[in-house]
């Protein structure tokens, strides 16, 4: 599939006319990856409209809450002033499930002086990509996104279950890479692929993953901002398609006890802007210093970035020993037990896979963070540890085990904040503290079962 080209607003207008669009969804991804924004009639969508939203719209937690006081308001004004939204014409796509011809356009957030709002997820990724551009490089990524199909469940106290397939039965065993298990949901995936085709999403292969009802979709490699947009839109698409087939699609990191969690593995490389040559391979096809420094950067900074890769209390249930998710930051070639994997590839396709990131991560934030770690590794010439050639699960835990621990590491890491933006790190960590405090008010079934009469 060819990359989407940049469009002017005049070309966007032509596109809307060609598709006879009558409504436009003006989308802004917030810190959790939720689509915020407004829906406008076609005639109201003009270049000089100056659409606005309050600052806090992109800076809320998953519960819709935000801090009442503290450093959050060193970045966001207490008066809750407006952001000024500007459409990115290259993101325009049809909404394939809409009854009337409807388009969706992703917007960037600016302040009234015309500066990108620093804590908006798209702004953070743009900031990191610009560092690479200034060095004459282009980062290239390819996400692999896992998710579960589950039976409809309207009671949060009831555990999730696999949905019923076309055979009339639910999966009761793990069906890794099973074609027949995917075929159980053919009607759903026919809709998913049809939607993706109409939206020009860059999707490649679909496979059945290890868990019961767990699937994975792979994306073709492309520029990080384009792919973050596509992951953002794909999540929305799959959820919508699943609802139309009487089931839910979830990107929770660990939705079902006893089943593997869902990840967003991100393959990443860096190429020269002018020549397109992969900086991870030299003229003889051997790995370069930059390749090893990039790995060293991931090893050094992933623990501090964990709150960005694993953003919820549920995220840390996925990262357990011998359960298809990493527990440390060892690296290895063609080794799926490590957190940082180098797949076997030709020199021009040499790349590094970050296996730590959860499917629940905001794609803009996660891609910005992993690229920031690698960037710091190259700039600081960080040498990696010796390659792990065995089972990394036999090693020690090297990742934070809880959201609270991860947030403290994020706050303490100044170099990462400098690359991502201190304003973003402040707003993000303050929001996550609010979520964490909210979670701590909940008494779980485990606590009632084991503590009620025993302590």
Image (spheres, helix red, strand yellow):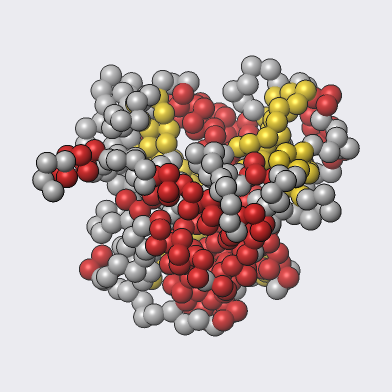
Q: Residue at x 78, y 50 (%)?
A: 111
Of 209 and 180, the residue lying toward us: 209
Q: Position of residue 27 (x, y in %)?
A: 67, 37
Between 390 and 299, the one nearer to me in the picture: 299
Figure check: 40 above or below 34 = above
Compared to residue 178, the image places residue 327 above or below, namely: below
Q: How many numbered callouts?
A: 0
Please indicate, yes or no, whether residue 116 appears anywhere in the rendered image: yes
Quarter of the image for residue 276 reads: bottom right
Q: Nearer the viewer, residue 333 or 78?
A: 78
Quadrant (top left, top right, bottom left, bottom right) of the N terminus: top right
Q: Position of residue 279 (x, y in %)?
A: 60, 73
**Residue farthest left in this picture:** 454
User: Residue pushed farthest top?
Assistant: 99
Residue at 27% x, 70% y is: 396
Residue 322 in which image quadrant? bottom left
Q: Position of residue 165 (x, y in %)?
A: 32, 24
The residue at the point 52 percent across, 57 percent down is 429
Residue at 33% from the left image edge and 51% from the top image edge? 318
Where 44 sits versus 144, above or below? Answer: above
- In the rendered view, does 160 fall on the left or right side of 268? left
Residue 231 in view in this figure: no
């Amino acid at each position: 599939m060819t990359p989407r080209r940049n469009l002017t607003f005049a070309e966007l207008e032509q596109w809307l006319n060609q598709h006879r669009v009558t409504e436009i969804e003006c989308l802004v991804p917030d810190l959790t990856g939720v689509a915020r924004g407004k829906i406008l009639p076609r005639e109201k969508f003009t270049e000089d409209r100056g659409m606005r939203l309050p600052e806090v719209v992109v800076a809320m937690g998953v519960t819709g809450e935000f801090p009442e006081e503290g450093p959050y308001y060193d970045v966001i004004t207490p008066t809750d002033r407006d952001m000024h939204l500007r459409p990115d014409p290259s993101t325009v796509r049809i909404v394939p499930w809409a009854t009337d011809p409807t388009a969706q356009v992703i917007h960037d957030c600016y302040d009234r002086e015309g500066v990108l709002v620093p804590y908006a997820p798209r702004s953070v990724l743009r900031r990191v990509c610009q560092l690479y551009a200034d060095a004459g490089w282009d980062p290239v990524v390819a996400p692999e996104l896992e998710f579960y199909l589950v039976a409809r469940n309207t009671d949060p106290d009831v555990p999730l279950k696999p949905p019923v397939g076309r055979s009339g039965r639910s999966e009761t065993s793990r069906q890794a890479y099973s074609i027949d298990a995917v075929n159980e949901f053919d009607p759903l995936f026919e809709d998913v692929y049809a939607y993706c085709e109409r939206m020009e999403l860059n999707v490649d292969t679909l496979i059945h993953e290890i868990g019961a009802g767990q699937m994975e979709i792979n994306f073709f490699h492309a520029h990080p901002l384009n792919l973050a947009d596509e992951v953002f839109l794909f999540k929305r698409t799959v959820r919508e398609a699943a609802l139309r087939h009487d089931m839910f699609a979830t990107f929770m990191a660990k939705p079902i006890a006893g089943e593997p969690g869902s990840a967003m593995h991100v393959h990443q490389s860096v190429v020269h802007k002018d020549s397109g040559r992969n900086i991870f391979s030299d003229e003889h096809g051997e790995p370069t210093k930059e390749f090893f420094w990039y790995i060293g950067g991931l090893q050094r900074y992933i623990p501090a970035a964990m709150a960005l890769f694993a953003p919820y209390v549920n995220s840390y249930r996925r990262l357990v020993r011998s359960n298809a998710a990493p527990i440390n930051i060892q690296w290895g070639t063609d080794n799926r037990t490590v957190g940082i994997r180098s797949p076997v590839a030709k020199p021009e396709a040499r790349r590094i896979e970050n296996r730590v990131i959860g499917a629940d991560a905001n794609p803009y934030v996660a891609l910005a963070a992993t690229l920031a770690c690698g960037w710091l590794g190259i700039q600081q010439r960080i040498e990696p540890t010796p390659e792990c050639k065995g089972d990394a699960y036999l090693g020690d835990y090297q990742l934070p085990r809880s959201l609270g621990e991860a947030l403290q590491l994020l706050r303490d890491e100044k170099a990462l904040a400098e690359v991502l933006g201190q304003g973003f790190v402040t707003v993000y960590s303050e929001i996550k503290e609010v979520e964490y405090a909210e979670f701590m008010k909940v008494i779980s079934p485990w606590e009632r079962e084991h503590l009620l009469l025993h302590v």
